[in-house]
Amino acid sequence: MSRTKKRHVCLSLLYLLISIALHGEHRIEKDINYRPKDLELPADDIRRTQCQLDLSIPENTPDFATIIWLHGGGLAGGKPCFSPVKDESFAQVAVSYRVTRQAPIPACIDDAAAATAWVLDNIEQYGGDPKRVYVAGHSAGGYLAALVGMDSKWLAEYGHSPNDLAGIIPVSGQVSTHFNVKKLLGDKGPKYRIVVDEYAPMHFAAADLPPICLIVGDPDIEFKSRVEENELLAISLKNIGHPFTEYHQQPGRDHGTVQRDADWIIPGFIERAEAWRREGMIQPNKKITGEKEIANILDAYRRFMIRMDEMGANRHFFDPHMSRLTDLLEQTFSIDGVPFVVQGLSTNEEGESILDIVVAMYSGTHYGIRTLRIQGIVQDESIASAIKESALIHSWKLYGQSSGQWVSDKDGDYSLIVNVDKIEKNATPVSFPMWNGPELR
């Protein structure tokens, strides 16, 4: 065999090995026309050649969830690709749609809806669960995912509604009217002037939408206004009673690199959303309020950590903040409504059930997140049993009183002892906007 042929064989084998490493046991079907009637069009018709999708299907995984991924490119360009999620238990769909230089608005939106409807109609025959279909995308693709998932008219054209979706996941997507849509429809205003009309996802915010996960980067380096728009949508959804909205703001991530964090945020969101659907939404029927609001303690803790970050070993600069924090922690307070994650449930030497709880907050400096660790002593074994059986404990509410005990470790994190006397399901899942550490994923 010639050297050239050997090199070709080696490169082909390397490509095969790389493909196996990337896709695992996945079967990939390419160039599926998501409007079957498009196959009746001439061979060179743009709808026939462009309106296609690629499907990556996990083998030996029954009733799998599916992530539809709409690519970015300002609606004017870009190439179809699968989502950045590396978890091989999901099916993935890479959608090609007509961009604005190929067809006028609203062709790209209609294409996104048609592709989504095709997946809802056909994924079961590939082994997937049609009730576990998530529409997602980055940048312009995030805009399309949000609009298709929130404005019912687009899916209605194909016999579906937003509530046929399991969730909507825009990654750094514009949620006001897209700047290119504005321009192409004749708007003469500045690019970053916010317009909220029939082409703005946030115009269709409603309480009965499926679970929504909004992911953005760092406001200092993200696309202009992108973080603020998404935060406004998240707040609006919460205020109108939407039961499951997550908002993730990732420090140090720009418009492009925020996709890296989507790799782990999206699977976590899907796990939480599906646990929420299984267990149902139960509002606490009674709010227990302690003598001191937890917000005061967290604020004091945050200020103390900021001073510690800024001053380092100069302890006298942050001693007053430590003193205030100590005074607050010596008072009885409620932990009702604290955003937290239960990391574990164990039994101590006295036979008590102990919760390892983490509360997270942004320190306000480039050091990012600080955590406050709470050791919860469960007062009722029925509570411990409920926690053990639940897949959704990280979005429950705890009710309890502090015992005034707290200690610090060598890393500067603090543990607080709390007697947990009540726990109830929380209708609104917890999110940690500035967190990207492994403990809270």
Image (cartoon, helix red, strand yellow):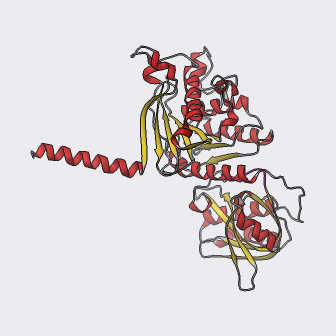
Residue 307 vertical position relative to residue 47 in the rendered view, above or below: below
**Residue 34 position in % (x across, y down):** 51, 27
Residue at the bottom extreme, as displayed: 349
In the image, 133 versus 331, the foreground residue is 133
The number of numbered badges drawn on the structure is: 0
**Residue 143 position in % (x across, y down):** 60, 32
Which quarter of the image is occupied by the C terminus?
bottom right
428 is within the stretch colored magenta: yes
In the image, 230 versus 36, the foreground residue is 36
Residue 212 visible to an observer of this rendering: yes
**Residue 436 position in % (x across, y down):** 58, 55
Residue 170 visible to an observer of this rendering: no
Q: Is residue 423 left or right of residue 13?
A: right
Residues shaded magenta? 426-431
**Residue 97 position in % (x across, y down):** 50, 26
Residue 304 vertical position relative to residue 33 in the rendered view, above or below: below
Residue located at (67% from left, 49% from top) = 273
Residue located at (52% from left, 23% from top) = 35
Q: Quadrant of residue 295?
A: bottom right
Q: Quadrant of residue 149?
A: top right
191 is within the stretch colored magenta: no
Magenta segment, principal secondary structure?
loop
In the image, 348 versus 413, the foreground residue is 348
Residue located at (53% from left, 38% from top) = 125
In the image, 162 versus 102, the foreground residue is 162
Residue at the front extreme, as displayed: 125
